Amino acid sequence: MWFDNGFYVELKDSAGNPATEVIVDPRTGAVSTEPGPAMMWNTRIGMHTRGGRAGAAGAGTVDATRARAIATSWLAANQAGTAIGSIDAYPGYFTIDLRRNGTVSGMMSVSSVTGAVWYHTWHGAFIAMEDS
């Protein structure tokens, strides 16, 4: 996904499952782990893992249905008029594309361990998307 602050890229593991998210700086080409959930909540490769394995957080208790309900409630209170687009499961959290008037308007994540919400403030305005 291309936003005015950079490119958002989903990385998948060898089985094709979402593994983590990165940001690519369009000016320098530098790649970094996406701030927020990918760094803090990813139970497989985030900051709170030990030796590449999930730490105390372990498997999530919030499934995709519950994450969608949490996100819907948060949006109603904080971003009225914004709807949920797609939802992708990562180790330890879900990332949700947000839509306003039928177009991508941003992203948010929900922890699969605690149900906490993290609204992505760093992307900027949506420009385009390519799925491969």
Image (cartoon, rainbow, N blue to C red):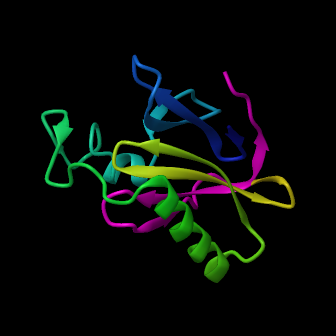
**115 is within the stretch colored magenta:** yes
Q: Residue extending furthest right?
A: 101
Residue in the picture at 40% in, 17% down: 14
Residue in the picture at 27% in, 45% down: 43
Query: Which of 114/104 is in front?
Result: 114
**131 is within the stretch colored magenta:** yes
Give the image location of residue 128, x and y in percent: 78, 38
Instruction: Tell whether 39 sits left or right of 72.
Output: left
Please report the bounds of the magenta region as a residue range: 105-132
Instruction: Tell whether 97 sits left or right of 15.
Output: right
Query: Which of 63/51 is in front?
Result: 63
**Where the N terminus falls, by quadrant?**
top right
Q: How many marks?
A: 0
Please determine whether, in this image, residue 98 is positioned above or below residue 29: below
Q: Residue extending furthest top?
A: 14
**Where the C terminus falls, by quadrant?**
top right
Quadrant of residue 99 in the image? Answer: bottom right
Quadrant of residue 116 in the image? Answer: bottom left
Please determine whether, in this image, residue 47 is positioned above or below residue 83: above
Give the image location of residue 110, x and y in percent: 46, 60
Quadrant of residue 20 in the image? Answer: top left
Instruction: Tell whether 80 sits left or right of 93.
Output: right
Please determine whether, in this image, residue 25 is positioned above or below residue 29: below
Give the image location of residue 29, x and y in percent: 56, 26
